[in-house]
Image (cartoon, rainbow, N blue to C red):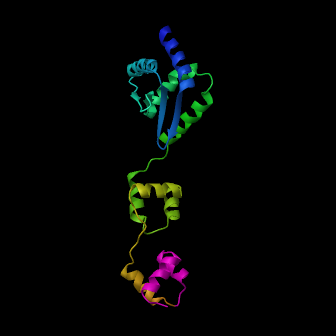
Amino acid sequence: MRQHEKEFLAWLAGFWEGEGNFYVKGSGARFQIGQSKLRGKRILLKTKEYFDKYNIDSVVSKDMNNCYRIRVSNVKDIRMIFNFLLPYIQFRKEEINYKLNLIKNKISAKRWSVSEKIYLIKNYNLISKDKIATSLDRSIMAIIGKANELKLTRRRCWTKEEIEILNSHTSLSMKQIGGKLNRSYGAVKAKRYRLRLS
């Protein structure tokens, strides 16, 4: 790396520490520097030139308050920027390392395989979320999140066989019938009421 490039990175690190931010939101992240004056625009365009040299995808924009910003939203690009800047950062290293670890954890989060998605689709209405979570070795929140993403609902129609069991086992408690049919107490109670069963 040439001396003028090192000087630029040292300047950029100090500039970002004073005027920039870096945050992680959802599955994405953003590196940003803002400047309110026209001189700031020139500085940010110079920064963009440097990023372009390394194929870092950045955008310079102006908001309604005439504030200029350079933004980078691609996670890999952000990590590359901080690989350049970390040797020159003085005050915010802990913050950067913490947020880079958040990004790393999000990237390495366990991805859903096709077979897991098929299992979820087939069983979401048949067995409890707890059992699905155990079968797939995932948290209940992960099951709910993926079900929402796949637009799955928990509404489950009663089959003829289930209604026959409901009719023929009137001596059993609703909890016992629910256990046989893998349905909740509330679902059994509501169905018995609709069928006028005592």
Q: Which residues are magenta?
A: 171-198
Which residue is drawn at the image coordinates 45% and 17% (left, top)? Answer: 39
Principal secondary structure, stretch drawn in magenta: helix
6 up-or-down from 18: above or below: above
Q: Residue pushed farthest top? A: 3
As for residue 197 lying within the magenta part, the answer is yes
Specify whether residue 86 is in view.
Answer: yes
Give residue 106's position: percent from left, percent from top: 50, 42
Whether 35 is drawn above or below 122: the answer is above
**Can you say whether 23 is above or below 180 in the image?**
above
Viewer-side residue, 182 vs 25: 25
Residue 14: quarter of image: top right
Residue closer to the observer: 47 or 126: 47
Residue 184, how many percent across, how many down?
Answer: 51, 75
x and y percentages locating residue 132 in the rendered image: 48, 62
Residue at the left extreme?
160
